[in-house]
Image (tube, helix red, strand yellow):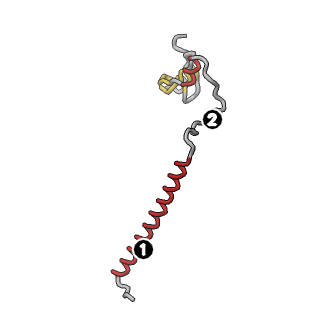
Amino acid sequence: MLPLTPLVLLLLCAGALVVALCVIYVVVLIGHGIAFLLHALRRPGRHRATSTSHQAVDSEAPAVEHAGLSLLQPCAVEGRTTLHRILADGTAKCWMCGTTTKAANQ
């Protein structure tokens, strides 16, 4: 048997570290292989979320409202410029406080 000199202990520790890293590497490779197989076995085209409460849009005005065009405008309640959702009738609703202001052309 070899005497336990510092050099022998260093080599033993380095060898144990290499073995541990190899085991971790093999475990990671197995995990990636399983993930790849699960991804490959999925049925394509099944990624859309199901709609529960949205109705079909019949005209252009509700489509604009649904799209939620937003602009920076001064908010009277907040006292600063905030992002406002512009609705189909031209009114603006503040995203921060929820205050609705009339359209500028009314």
Residue found 43% across the figure and 71% down from its top: 19
Q: Position of residue 92 (x, y in %)?
A: 54, 20
Residue found 38% across the figure and 80% down from its top: 9
Amino acid at the residue labelled 2: Thr
Q: Is residue 105 above or below residue 39?
A: above
Q: Is residue 19 left or right of residue 55?
A: left
Q: How many marks?
A: 2
Query: How far separated are the C-alphas under marks 1 and 2?
Result: 52 Å
Q: Is residue 21 above or below residue 2?
A: above
Question: Few, some or many C-alpha atoms within 10 Å of disc 2 (few <14, some 14-19, many ≥20)?
Answer: few
Residue found 48% across the figure and 23% down from its top: 71
Amino acid at the residue labelled 1: Ala
Q: Are marks 1 and 2 in contact (CB under 8 Å)?
A: no
The numbered mark at residue 50 is 2
Query: Which residue is disc 1 drawn over?
Result: 16
Q: Residue furthest right?
A: 52
- Quadrant of image for the N terminus: bottom left
**Front residue of this view, candidates 104 and 60:** 60
**Front residue of this view, candidates 106 and 56:** 56
Label 1: which secondary element? helix
**Front residue of this view, candidates 84 and 48:** 48
Q: Residue furthest left?
A: 7
Q: Residue furthest top?
A: 106
Q: Position of residue 50 (x, y in %)?
A: 63, 35
The numbered mark at residue 27 is none
Q: Earlier in the sequence, mark 1 or mark 2?
A: 1
Q: Position of residue 76 (x, y in %)?
A: 53, 22
- Quadrant of image for the C terminus: top right
